[in-house]
Image (cartoon, helix red, strand yellow):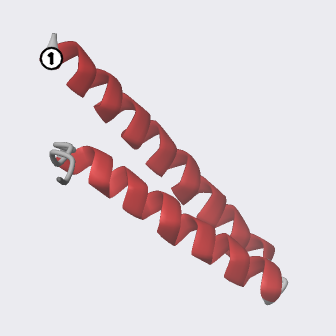
Amino acid sequence: MSKPKIRMPAAARAGIGLLIMGGIIVGLGEYTQRGALSLYGIIMVAGGFVLYMASSIHARRTAR
């Protein structure tokens, strides 16, 4: 038997995508020693985290 699928809001999926892309950009920026690229990646990671957390909190509150 498989578990029922978890319904994830689209904003949460976008937040996870930003987290992953930002992490890759930070890694590339550190590898190539470009501080501006790493800073841009950190901003993407922070934005993705905030988007994911906000959409998760909103989904839990509306589920009640």
Which residue occupies 38% across, 51% down? 15
User: Please, is residue 22 above or below residue 58 in the view?
Assistant: below
Q: Please name whichever residue, 4 or 6, is drawn nearer the observer in this view of the structure.
A: 4
Q: In the image as oriented, which residue stretches furthest toward the bottom?
A: 32
Which residue is farthest front?
1
Question: Which residue matches tag 1?
Answer: 62
Compared with 29, 11 (above or below) is above
Kindly identify the amino acid type of the residue bearing the numbered disc 1: Thr
The percent coordinates of residue 29 (x first, y second) are 73, 79
Who's the residue at 46% across and 37% down the image?
50
Percent of width and height locating residue 34: 79, 81
What residue do we see at 38% from left, 41% from top? 51
Please identify the quarter of the rendering in which residue 40 is found: bottom right
Report the side of 21 relative to 42 (left or right). Answer: left
Is 15 rendered above or below residue 63?
below
Q: Is residue 14 left or right of residue 36?
A: left
Mark 1 residue element:
helix
Q: Residues within 10 Å of mark 1 (few under 14, many from 20)?
A: few
Q: Position of residue 28 (x, y in %)?
A: 69, 83
Rendered residue at 79%/89% (across/down): 32
